[in-house]
């Protein structure tokens, strides 16, 4: 229930951060302004007794995030790839959240596997290891099939994970509502839509059959991609709470020492992981949206192996073209075209001045091109771009949330392999290839042919469709139902005391 009781959950978030010692650490790492820092500490300190104690053997940030639950762990995973935002030390510490969380009991996992497969674990597997990796939603065991001797990875959902996420997401919805009530200017960010998007992503992770389907589609799309491979899904043994895949051997992407020892070129790997992501997003419109180090390995032959397909991003062809043109415009420093694309796509209200917007974009892009490669940051670009679009009334585009977030994460992976990676030089050939194939006269002819094919299929129904549309257009609209004003007053009354805390806490996670 998305009601006032969620205030307690948000207070407990701040109290847990303060009690575990993570509040100051996170504020320092993110270089929070003194006003935010002071307000957060002032509001959270009296409620420390409400905070979760957590595992005292863990460092403060890990202790707090793991105590708060899986949704918070997800945010920690994102920050683990961003040493430029939280610092090298904290980023390294947070990598534990990718696949080294405390596991649940192996016997519980075996019971879940046996229930899913309808037969005892020993009847299917000759070997079944203790957990070798544990993340926020599931853990993985290495096993060997009894009939073939093949090594496989068995992924099992955590017990009670659905209820845990439901609780956190309800609190996030409440915080989003408080932001909209107490800060009208923030409504353009569509905080509730953002949470709804996050909820949809999480729900997809909580059904491993959907993950198996994503893995199958991703494999088909990338079959011809050189230097990239995916483990195969064993459909016969997979279900809603259990998924079995081919075992993938290789050096973890987050272990530079192991990669060096295996003789791989880390600079080339960094470039390849960026280009593969862009190719999947632009060419296919279907991409791995959780490409942190914990979900990537380097095979002995040098292939990049991706796994854990619970979060996959999808963007339609029109959005891909818009995104490619924006990237291409920045690469070519054609800010006028970048501005025009924003207006053509409806991202910026039409009553704003396109030339003024182009000048503002130039102020974003030019300083970046003068930077040393190690200082060029997609995260920084998106931050600056956010400030500019805020001034011009651009609303949050929920269809781009995963794309933008994943690009920041992948950049972090590439930088962890080689801090001198120049994202613009790496992205340029992929974006140029997409532009050449999908924007221009050839693409226009292809689009026209597709349009004619659609019209030919619907030809006999077109007169009826047009008639129905005209009837709806001419019919008077029903009077809107007036909502009860007391609801708004109630929300405001409940949030007035603790609204500042809800806003500040939620800001950390949007």
Image (cartoon, grey):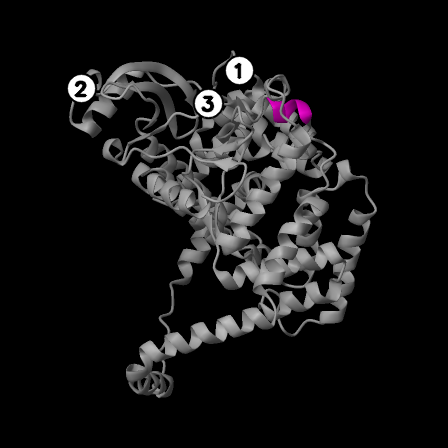
The reply to whether residue 23 is visible in this rendering is yes
**Residue 420, position as x, y percentages in the image:** 74, 34
Give the position of the N terminus as an image quadrant: top left
Within 10 Å of disc 2 (Cα), the crowding (few <14, some 14-19, many 20+) is some
Rendering coords of residue 490 (x, y %): 43, 52
Left or right: 121, with 216 as reference point: left
In the picture, residue 162 is in which quadrant?
top left
Task: Name the residue tied to disc 1.
Answer: 58
Which label sits on residue 249? 3
Label 2 SS: loop
In which quarter of the view is residue 91 placed? Answer: top right
Mark nearest the camera among 1 and 2 is: 2
Q: What's the mark number on residue 120?
A: 2
Between tags 3 and 1, which lies in front?
Answer: 3
Majority SS type along the magenta span: helix
Q: Identify which residue, 317 or 384, lies in the foreground.
A: 317
Q: Is residue 386 magenta?
A: no
């Amino acid at each position: 229930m998305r009601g006032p009781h969620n205030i307690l959950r948000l207070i407990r978030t701040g109290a847990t951060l303060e009690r575990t010692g993570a509040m100051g650490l996170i504020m320092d790492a993110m270089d929070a302004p003194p006003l935010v820092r002071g307000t957060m500490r002032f509001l959270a300190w009296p409620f420390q007794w409400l905070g979760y104690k957590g595992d005292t053997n863990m460092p403060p940030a890990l202790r707090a995030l793991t105590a708060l639950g899986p949704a918070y762990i997800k945010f920690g995973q994102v920050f683990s790839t961003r040493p430029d935002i939280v610092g090298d030390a904290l980023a390294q510490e947070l990598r534990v959240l990718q696949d080294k969380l405390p596991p649940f009991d192996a016997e519980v996992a075996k019971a879940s596997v046996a229930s899913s497969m309808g037969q005892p674990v020993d009847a299917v597997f000759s070997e079944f290891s203790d957990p070798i990796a544990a993340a926020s939603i599931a853990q993985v065991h290495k096993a060997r099939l009894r009939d073939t001797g093949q090594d496989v990875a068995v992924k099992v959902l955590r017990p009670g994970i659905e209820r845990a996420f439901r609780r956190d997401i309800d609190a996030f919805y409440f915080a989003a509502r408080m932001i909209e009530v107490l800060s009208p200017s923030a409504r353009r960010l569509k905080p509730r839509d953002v949470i709804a998007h996050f909820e949809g992503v999480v729900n997809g992770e909580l059904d491993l059959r959907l993950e198996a389907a994503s893995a199958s589609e991703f494999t088909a799309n990338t079959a011809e991609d050189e230097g990239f491979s995916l483990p195969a899904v064993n459909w016969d043994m997979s279900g809603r709470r259990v998924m079995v895949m081919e075992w993938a051997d290789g050096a973890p992407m987050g272990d530079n020492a192991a990669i060096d020892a295996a003789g791989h070129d880390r600079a080339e790997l960094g470039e390849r992981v960026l280009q593969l992501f862009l190719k999947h997003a632009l060419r296919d419109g279907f991409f791995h949206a959780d490409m942190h180090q914990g979900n990537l390995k380097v095979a002995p032959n040098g292939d990049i192996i991706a796994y854990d397909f619970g979060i996959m991003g999808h963007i339609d062809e029109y959005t891909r073209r818009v995104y490619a043109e924006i990237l291409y415009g920045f690469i070519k420093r054609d800010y006028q075209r970048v501005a025009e694309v924003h207006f053509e796509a409806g991202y910026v209200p039409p009553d704003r001045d396109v030339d003024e917007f182009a000048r503002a974009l130039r102020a974003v892009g030019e300083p970046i091109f003068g930077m040393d490669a190690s200082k060029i940051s997609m995260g920084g670009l998106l931050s600056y771009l956010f400030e500019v679009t805020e001034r011009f009334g651009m609303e949050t585009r929920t269809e781009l949330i995963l794309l933008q977030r994943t690009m920041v994460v992948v950049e972090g992976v590439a930088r962890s392999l080689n801090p001198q990676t120049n994202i613009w030089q790496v992205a340029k050939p992929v974006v140029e290839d997409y532009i050449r194939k999908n924007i221009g006269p050839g693409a226009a002819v292809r689009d026209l042919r597709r349009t004619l094919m659609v019209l030919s299929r619907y030809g006999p129904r077109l007169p009826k469709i047009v008639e129905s549309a005209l009837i709806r257009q001419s019919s008077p609209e029903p009077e809107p139902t007036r909502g009860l004003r007391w609801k708004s007053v109630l929300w405001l009354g409940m949030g007035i005391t603790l609204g500042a805390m809800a806003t500040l806490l939620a800001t950390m996670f949007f």
